[in-house]
Amino acid sequence: MQSSSDNALLPLAAKKPTVLERKRDDCDRSMEISDAIHIPAPPPQVWAALNTPEILKHCIPGCETIEKISETEFQAIAVVKVGPIRTKFSGRLYLNDIAPPRHYRLTGQGEGGVAGFAKGAADVQLFETEEGNAVLSYTVQAQVGGRLAQLGARLIDAAARSMATMFFERFAEILLNNPPIRAEETIAPLPIAST
């Protein structure tokens, strides 16, 4: 459990995710990004939102579609721009090691045609503050290949940090501007407030 003094260290979307590691070989680039975000909503509500395709679609930068195939699988299409390369990725995401409403591991891979591929995994954990709000902690391991891997490491890192920041800013805004979500409501589309 986080103390109220710890909350001061986790302002909502106020800091950039940390790039922990960067590797390079001839065919791909790998990185690890880690961060923790304070979200002014209780963990069960945050958990429900993290599993609601309509909310994810509005939060993922460039997301055109996201469909829940099963309780542990999503299919998505997103347009991503990294430096001079803009491409449409199509891929699947899988939930593993699920412990509602506290943890899951998200794995997936997307293909972007001649631009290359992206694959990775994210460990997502929710903690409750003394005030009953959530702290969402994540660590992402990602790898890109093809033309994307030819871009500079700084450009790829900056794009990854920017996408993570945009996701959590949008996610927090949706939770603040919409009624609470309960786990049993995650199947039906949620009305999203216009911005």
Image (cartoon, helix red, strand yellow):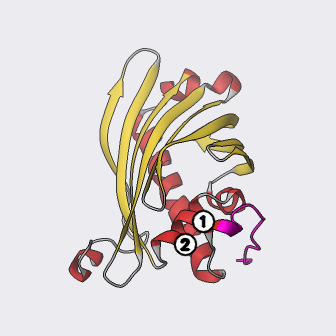
Residue under pointer 1: 49
Q: CA distance from mark 2 to mark 1?
A: 6 Å
- Work out whether 179 lies above or below 32: below
Can residue 170 be spotted in the picture? yes
Identify which residue, 102 or 77, lies in the foreground. 102
Q: Residues within 10 Å of mark 1 (few under 14, many from 20)?
A: many
Identify which residue, 159 or 68, lies in the foreground. 68
Identify which residue, 25 or 84, lies in the foreground. 25
Residue 195 x %, y %: 70, 77
Give the main secondary structure, helix, strand or loop, of the magenta stretch.
loop
The N terminus is located in which quarter?
bottom left
Which residue type carries mark 1? Ala
Q: Residue at x 43, y 32 (%)?
A: 152
Q: Are marks 2 and 1 in contact (CB under 8 Å)?
A: yes
Q: Residue at x 78, y 65 (%)?
A: 189
Label 2 secondary element? helix
Left or right: where does residue 81 sit relative to residue 119?
A: right
Can residue 85 be spotted in the picture? no
Label 1 secondary element? helix
Numbered-mark total: 2
Looking at the rendering, the stretch of residues picked out in magenta corresponds to 184-195
Residue 162 x %, y %: 49, 54
Residue 54 location, quadrant: bottom right
Q: Residue at x 53, y 31 (%)?
A: 119
Name the mark on residue 45: 2
Residue 45 location, quadrant: bottom right
Assess whether residue 12 is covered by the magenta stretch: no
Residue 145 x %, y %: 52, 23
Q: Residue at x 57, y 81 (%)?
A: 176
Left or right: where does residue 102 sit relative to residue 89?
A: left
